[in-house]
Image: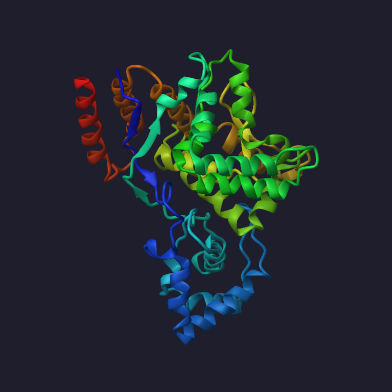
Amino acid sequence: PVGPFLWLLLPLPLGAADPLPIEGWLVNSCIQARRKCQADPVCSAAYHHLNSCTSSISTPSPTQELLVPEDCREAAKHLRNSSLMSCTCHRRMKNQVACLDIYWTIHLARSFGDYELDVSPYEDTVTRKPWKMNLSKLNMLKPDSDLCLKFAMLCTLNDKCDRLRKAYGEACSGSRCQRHICLHQLRAFFEKASEPHAQGLLLCPCAPADQGCGQRRRNTIAPSCALPSGAPNCLELQSLCVADPLCRSRLVDFQTHCHPLDILGTCATEQSRCLRAYMGLIGTAMTPNFVSNVNISVALSCTCRGSGNRQEECEQLEESFSHNSCLMEAIAAKMRFHSQLFSQDWADSTFSVMEHQNKNPALMPQPWVPSLFSCTLTLILLLSLW
């Protein structure tokens, strides 16, 4: 039998179990790049001028052209060789909002000329640090308890996860909850709680007939407070999001990592990045959620009614969540993995999860895969001796 402690040798994002990373941990954070720019009078003057341009230039929709005044174009030219052009941010870094403000200021210089699709500002850094989960303490639950209840208990047994969960629970409860405070605490939970704990709560698998489990899963993000009371137009929701550097960054990150590349459904990046980007939207104006208690379909809380001649654009935005094959496959794979964590034949199921996640030939192999395989093989051999 498997012992009471189970070590999951999975790559976690930088900061998943550590304090928030500082900007120095990134290869080229926008905050560092701006400091270098400020040391150069020409670069500094061009950056400040471009920064003043951003307030007067509205962000276009994908069907509109970016109109940039000539003086702003000149300022952008002076920054073409600056390290600001390739700077990035991290969703768990300190001063994240300041970093993103710099990124979107420089975006004008990046998009100089033809209008380009936005590129995610986030650099995803991973570490091989394992996550320790004590399954023995789940004995206090009934053996037939659903997995959403078990993952909630695992969060409760972890001091940091429990503290962060209680904070957003209090902020998002009551008939007079303040939505902006609720969203802020939700973002804090998904940024600061360890990724396995957060994913376990949000993506716990439920039997199709178990509506109680499905309801717990839907209520993870406190939808009665976190989501709009009515059903706003999806394009209006997008406009609110794009006006906020943090929300805009999370939306672009989602579009970057959960975007099918072709009609065959080939996904842009690996499933872990897509899930991380999806969870990054929770706590923003574009917070998605499960649409029912009986399946794993997700959607934005908005409608395309009243979109006029932008109806098609609105439907594309809405369907990027509700009919996104890459997102659905990533969610389903993570739920299968979570289900296998609690199965008796855990070692064998690890191979099936790893195999499924690496089936996409379009994805580049990751540098941690050989070490992950060898660590998993070692764990399997040890378990066979117990």
Does residue 246 lie above or below 384 as drawn? below
> Percent position (x, y) of residue 233?
74, 42
The residue located at (57%, 61%) in the rendering is: 97
Is 275 or 195 nearer to us in this picture?
195
Does residue 378 lie above or below 105 as drawn? above
Residue situated furthest bottom in the rendering: 41
- Asked where in the image residue 244 lies, by quadrant, the reply is bottom right
Is any part of residue 56 visible from this angle? yes
Does residue 51 lie above or below 63 as drawn? below
> Percent position (x, y) of residue 48?
57, 79
Q: Is residue 124 left or right of residue 168?
A: left
Does residue 25 lie above or below 141 as drawn? below
Image quadrant holding the C terminus, namely top left
Is any part of residue 261 visible from this angle? no
Q: Is residue 262 left or right of residue 214?
A: left
Is 366 or 344 nearer to us in this picture?
344
